């Protein structure tokens, strides 16, 4: 049974069709990701689901509550971390949580909230003194104050360094262990792979794919990628002629014309054969090849396949 269901959501801002018929359902206890580039419509979708924004059409149901008709009822059920959370700089971490707890009839003890996000040692620190990662963790604790059933996280790790990002991933995974259902947005494919049970890839206000991470990657049918840079002016056909190569992506860099650096991705099933065939072609045709790496296909490759664009930072 799905705990959350979204059907036919549409929202325009004047001429901008931000959300164009988004539908999906989220099962209790899963981490569900809305993944896509900036401007895809992720935040708008989330804010409609949270009852913070009106939709032009469509329905959202959370635990049987029609969110668009009864936004006040849904507030008891959900916890919301906004994309940019404003903090009271003159309050301590514990005081901030106490203030948020006072908004609800029922709330979790501040000590528990601090424990969930590993901020016990910062209880007495002013919010202004927190690092970016600590602020994000506090904003998650703020979203947990009313012990919500569903937690919404909008780009929870944007702007964080790799270590802080990993710490936050651990917090999100621990929320699932506590039985929370989590709906998050991200434009980091790696983050979606690490955290999400299922992913809806959103682009241009539409869901263009929806499955488990594994299912999406397996759907490519090509498990491995060979990637390198070159200044050779070889054509797509020349790369496609390499043994076992099933798809070729040629990305032009900022430079133009003859001798400009290009990023090449070759997808293949049989890595050994394709690699030796590439090396033969390189020797025969005098291609320069630098930064050669071999990797498993990722969600990034799924996005590239679906849209023809890379989402990488
Ligand atoms: N309040 C607003 N007024 C006008 N346009 C908006 C507003 N909010 C978002 N948009 C536009 O709607 C589109 C989707 O935005 P958003 O939902 O924030 O995407 P995402 O979160 O995926 O980056 C973008 O083109 C954005 O510029
Ligand atoms: Mg957003």
Image: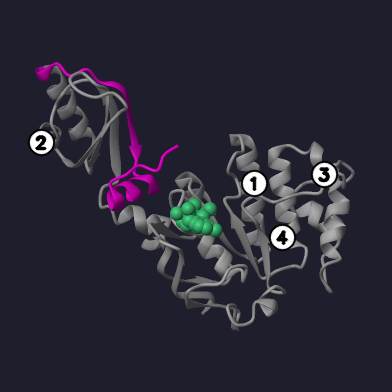
Side (left or right) of 263 relative to 44:
left
Earlier along the polypeptide chain: callout 1 or callout 2?
Answer: 1
Mark toward the viewer: 3 or 2: 3
| Residue receiving disc 2 | 237
Label located before the other in sequence (1 or 4): 4
Between 229 and 277, the one nearer to me in the picture:
229
Give the CA distance from mark 4 to mark 3: 18 Å
Residues shaded magenta: 284-313
Residue 110 pos. (x, y %): 85, 58
- Residue 291 painted magenta: yes
Secondary structure at badge 4 equals helix
Asked if the residue at tag 3 contacts the one at tag 4, i.e. Cβ–Cβ closer than 8 Å, the answer is no
In percent of the image, x 15 and y 33: which residue is there? Answer: 239
Of labels 4 and 3, earlier in sequence is 3
What crowding class fits label 2: few (fewer than 14 Cα within 10 Å), some (14-19), or many (20 or more)? few
Q: Which residue is mark 4?
A: 143
Q: Within 10 angstroms of label 4, few (less than 14), some, or many (20 or more) residues?
A: many
- Residue 117, compared with residue 284, is above or below; it is below
- State the image quarter where residue 290 is shown: top left
Q: Residue at x 49, y 60 (%)?
A: 197
């Amino acid at each position: 049974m799905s705990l959350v269901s979204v059907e036919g959501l549409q929202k325009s801002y004047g001429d901008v069709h931000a959300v164009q018929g988004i539908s999906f359902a989220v099962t209790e206890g899963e981490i569900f990701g809305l993944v896509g580039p900036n401007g895809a419509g992720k935040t708008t979708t989330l804010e409609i689901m949270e009852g913070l924004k009106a939709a032009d059409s469509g329905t959202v149901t959370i635990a049987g509550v029609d969110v668009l008709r009864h936004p006040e009822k849904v507030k008891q059920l959900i916890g919301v971390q906004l994309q940019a959370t404003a903090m009271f700089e003159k309050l301590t971490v514990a005081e901030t949580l106490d203030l948020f707890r006072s908004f609800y009839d029922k709330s979790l003890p501040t000590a528990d909230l601090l424990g969930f996000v590993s901020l016990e040692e910062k209880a007495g620190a002013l919010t202004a003194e927190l690092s970016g990662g600590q602020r994000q963790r506090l904003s998650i604790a703020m979203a947990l104050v009313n012990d919500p059933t569903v937690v919404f996280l909008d780009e929870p790790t944007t702007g964080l360094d790799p270590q802080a990002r990993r710490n936050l991933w651990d917090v999100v995974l621990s929320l699932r262990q506590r039985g929370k259902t989590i709906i998050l947005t991200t434009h980091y494919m790696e983050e979606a792979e690490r955290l999400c049970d299922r992913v809806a890839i959103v682009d241009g206000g539409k869901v263009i794919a929806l499955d488990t991470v594994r299912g999406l990657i397996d759907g490519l049918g090509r498990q491995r990628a060979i990637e390198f840079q070159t200044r050779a002016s070889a054509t797509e056909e020349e790369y496609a002629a390499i043994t076992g190569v099933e798809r070729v992506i040629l990305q032009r860099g900022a430079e133009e014309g003859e001798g400009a650096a290009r990023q090449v991705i070759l997808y293949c099933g049989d890595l050994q054969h394709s690699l030796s065939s590439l090396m033969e072609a390189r020797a025969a045709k005098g291609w320069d090849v630098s930064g050669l790496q071999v990797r498993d296909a990722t969600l990034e490759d799924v996005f590239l396949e679906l849209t023809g664009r890379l989402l990488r930072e």
